[in-house]
Amino acid sequence: MRPTLLWSLLLLLGVFAAAAAAPPDPLSQLPAPQHPKIRLYNAEQVLSWEPVALSNSTRPVVYRVQFKYTNSKWFMADIMSIGVNCTQITATECDFTATRPSAGFPMDFNVTLRLRAELGALHSAWVTMPWFQHYRNVTVGPPENIEVTPGEGSLIIRFSSPFDIADTSTAFFCYYVHYWEKGGIQQVKGPFRSNSISLDNLKPFRVYCLQVQAQLLWNKSNIFRVGHLSNISCYETMADASTELQQVILISVGTFSLLSVLAGACFFLVLKYRGLIKYWFHTPPSIPLQIEEYLKDPTQPILEALDKDSSPKDDVWDSVSIISFPEKEQEDVLQTL
């Protein structure tokens, strides 16, 4: 009996050793997806993971996502339940971002997700992620569509919120403006509930740079989520009313001063060059009309014409000097006289 029993034991050990030495069936167990993570940025709700790779299978691995709320059962992430199909998908990402009111997870709900890989009848173990609440865990981006209008010693800032909040009684945004004169010290103004902010009492004709920041406040849990700052943008302010008045006064005084200087310069030039100016503008002497007519027609009796036109009251004579005269005309004049 002993040899038989010993032989049986040896045979059994050989079978176990052969089974242990045989390679495992690669399709007997699927590996679970690795490094799943949920992205919560503004309104985005995106679950992603690394793909499962199988070397001995040509069929694609598909994935299934389930979710549950606090104290609820697990639900399939499909169109009927959440508005997004994340059941037996080949992609390594599932986007739960709400594109319509019935899609996406409520932002104030406690949500838990789990994920597994599937290949035919085979599947991996579930990978469960830590629960999250959107308002608690979201990363808030900067305000969007920022527009700045320079005013009279001011900057008017308009923008839209990082994302829409359905019920502002439970959560809302407030805003801060970080601003500084270029090369100066930064200042912060806020909080504001409005999407339009005016920075007043700024220096006119100065360049100011600014950044806008949003902060999410969740009333239910008294949670604050500080958002990212917007990109730096710089603008030059315009003149205010007092500056415009100063400009008008300065322009008037400058114009008057310039005119005074020009008038003084003209007066000085007139005094200095009055002889030359008098020479330029002096009217040359003219020949009396009777003599001019006589020179044209020497046969006219010039003395009678002068006596006839002379008034007894006017005792004024013009002195005329003949510098040159042709000889023939000179003889005629002497004969006439």
Image (tube, rainbow, N blue to C red):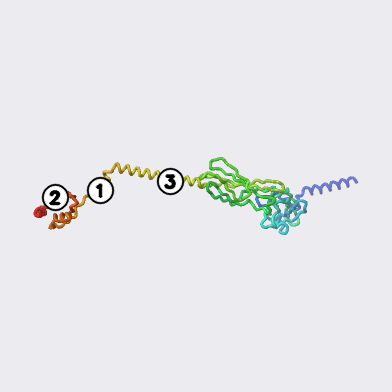
Residues at circles 3 and 2 in contact by the CB criterion of under 8 Å:
no
Label 2 crowd (10 A; few <14 / some 14-19 / many >=20): few
Seen in the picture, residue 94 relative to 276 is either above or below; the reply is below
Q: Is residue 33 left or right of residue 232?
A: right
Residue density around tag 1, few if under 14, some if 14–19, many if 20 or more, within 10 Å: few
Can the viewer see residue 31 in this picture?
no
* Image vertical order of residue 181 relative to residue 290, above or below: above
Residue 239 x/y as whole percent: 50, 47
| Residue 96: image location, x then y, percent | 68, 54
At x 48% / y 46%, what residue is drawn? 245
Residue wearing tag 2: 324
- Assess whether mark 3 and mark 1 are in contact (beta carbons under 8 angstroms): no
Name the image quarter holding residue 86: bottom right
Which kind of residue does numbered mark 1 sit on? His
Q: What residue does disc 3 label?
A: 252
Marks 3/2: CA–CA distance: 62 Å
Callout 2: SS = loop
Q: Position of residue 66 (x, y in %)?
A: 74, 54
Most foreground residue, 83 or 58: 83
Separation (CA) of disc 1 from disc 3: 38 Å
Q: Secondary structure at mark 3?
A: helix
Specify which label sits upstream in the sequence, 1 or 2. Answer: 1
Q: Amino acid at mark 2?
A: Ser
- Residue 175 vs residue 96, the one in the foreground: 175
Cα separation, mark 1 vs mark 2, equals: 25 Å
Question: Which residue is situated farthest in the top direction here?
Answer: 185
In primary-sequence order, the first of circles 3 and 2 is 3
- Which numbered marker is on residue 282? 1
Residue nearest the viewer, comparing 256 with 198: 256
Q: Residue at x 45, y 45 (%)?
A: 249
Looking at the image, which is closer to me, 2 or 158? Answer: 158
